[in-house]
Amino acid sequence: MNKMLKVLVVCTLCATALVGCKKEASAKFAKAGLGVVSNWSAEKGQVNTTFVALGLDADGKIQYIDLDVAQSSPVDGALDKTKEERGADYGMAGASGIKKEWDAQAVAFEEWCIGKTPAEVAAVETMDY
């Protein structure tokens, strides 16, 4: 989860920096953005694409966040669902220190982000294992 968290922080910062919309009275968010980062895992033979969508209020605080990871394998092509779509079938709970699946951990992280600025999210302490 810590590597994912680092990627998500980068995505969050990218989303805030790259895409913004003009503030209008009827706009739901002052800024909205989408960050996407892909990497190749040679040991697993798969491409991981992490993406996050953000909606920020006029004060720059996160009001909406949705994150997920799409995994695909050019080797066997068997991976056709995102981690969120796999839910309990992803199989992370057994390896997790808190015994939670990826989708449950992602929802908890999204909830934690609401009301914080991207800088506050980026400042969260992480650990490498």
Image (cartoon, rainbow, N blue to C red):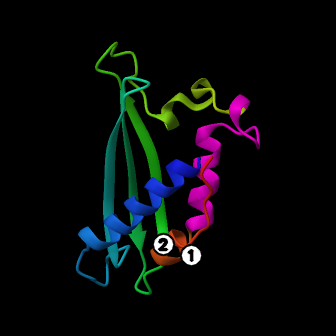
The residue wearing badge 2 is 62
Q: State the residue in front, 80 or 23.
A: 80
The type of residue carrying mark 2 is Ile
Q: Is residue 98 left or right of residue 29?
A: right
Q: Is residue 125 left or right of residue 15?
A: right
User: Percent position (x, y) of residue 93?
Assistant: 70, 33
**Residue at (53, 28) in percent of width and height:** 86
User: Percent position (x, y) of residue 65?
Assistant: 47, 60
Residue 38: within the magenta? Answer: no
Q: Is residue 88 left or right of residue 22?
A: right
Tell me the chief SS of the magenta region. Answer: helix
In the rendered structure, are the residues bearing label 1 and label 2 in contact, judged by CB atoms less than 8 Å apart?
yes
User: Percent position (x, y) of residue 9?
Assistant: 46, 62
Residue 102: within the magenta? Answer: yes
Residue 39 visible, this angle:
yes
Question: Disc 1 to disc 2, how far (Cα)?
Answer: 5 Å
Q: What segment carries the magenta color?
A: 94-113
